[in-house]
Each structure stands twice: as C-alpha cells, then as structure tokens.
Amino acid sequence: VSLAVTYYMSRRYDDAIRELQTILATVPDDPGALLIFGMALLERARFDEAIHALERGVSSSGRSPMLLGMLSAAYARGGREPAARRVLGELAEMRKSRYVTPGAFVFAYTGLGEHDQTFAWLERAFEDRTNIMKFIKVNPMYDALRADPRFTSLVRRVELE
C-alpha cells in the first residue's frame, strides 16, 4: 500500500491502481488499500468505481471517518451531491460523540468544492497535527487549492513546524 501511496502522490494514478488491484485481489476488504484505490480512481474520473471501492472500505472499516470523508468527496465529484451531503451529515453526527479527524471533513469539503470550509478544516487539521498535513505539498486532492494564498500560507506554516 505504501508503494501505491507513493504512486498516487506522484500522480502516477494508473500505477497506483494496478498496484492496489494486486493487493485487493488477495485482501479484498483492506480499508487502507480501498481508500487509496478510491482516491486514485477519483483522479482518473472513474467515479462509479471509486464510489464502489470506498463504499466497500467504509463497510469493512466499521465506518471509518476518513473513508466516509473520501466517500463524500467521491459522491460529490461523481455528481451525487445529496449522497455527499448525507455522508457529511453522518460525519457531523459522529463528531458529537467521538473524535473525528478534521481530515475527514477536509476530504468531504474538497470534493464538494467548498473551499472556505476546506480551509477551515485544514486549519483544524493543522492545529491537531493530523497525519494529512504531512502530505499537504504533494496530495493531488489539493491541486484546486494551490493558487489560493491561504494554501501558500498554510504550507509555509507546516514547513516551520
């Protein structure tokens, strides 16, 4: 899975997809593999396949917030905004009773194209020092945000930490 993540971050989506297909042929319900598989499929605009993979990941992970966030993004990018908002609502409800990493909301709002909300949750992710921050400079999910001065400022602050 680490190799597939490297391929994904390097924008070698087809290589990531191939690597993950090999893994998933052996371990079909691996949540980590399904997350990255869904992300790579999204970057290739293979929305139905991404949604299917992420739904499997959500199910096999016991409704992992990160997988729910990415599923919301996949629904949104695949033209299923009501489903995306339903999953986002589930995340908000989940947050009332337990810790939900801000990254889940970053994924969801990025998929919905709601940049102000994305930046609000990126700030929380920065404050919480969540794992997604280490990929801020390379994750393709953030490509639509890179020209925004808030993104440049955030990257600079992450580099100083």
Image (cartoon, rainbow, N blue to C red):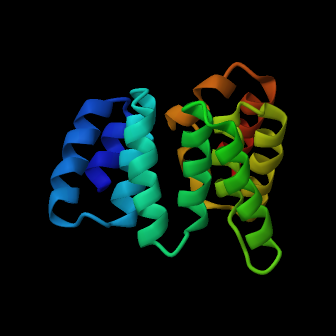
Rendered view: 66 above or below 20: below
Whole-percent x, y for residue 37 in the image: 35, 47
Number of on-image labels: 0
Residue that appears at 16% across and 58% down: 25
In the image, taking residue 47 as reference, residue 96 lies left or right, namely right
Q: Quadrant of residue 33?
A: bottom left
Whole-percent x, y for residue 54 in the image: 45, 53
Whole-percent x, y for residue 28 in the image: 25, 63
Rendered view: 82 above or below 98: above
Q: Residue furthest bottom?
A: 97
- Residue 40 appears in the figure: no
Q: Quadrant of residue 126?
A: bottom right
In the image, taking residue 96 as reference, residue 72 lies left or right, namely left
Residue that appears at 33% across and 43% down: 6
Residue that appears at 82% across and 41% down: 117
Residue that appears at 65% across and 47% down: 83
In the image, taking residue 68 as reference, residue 31 lies left or right, namely left
- Residue 153 appears in the figure: yes
Whole-percent x, y for residue 58 in the image: 49, 64
Rendered view: 70 above or below 150: below
In the image, taking residue 82 as reference, residue 64 lies left or right, namely left
Depth check, front residue: 120 or 24:
24
| Quadrant showing the N terminus | bottom left
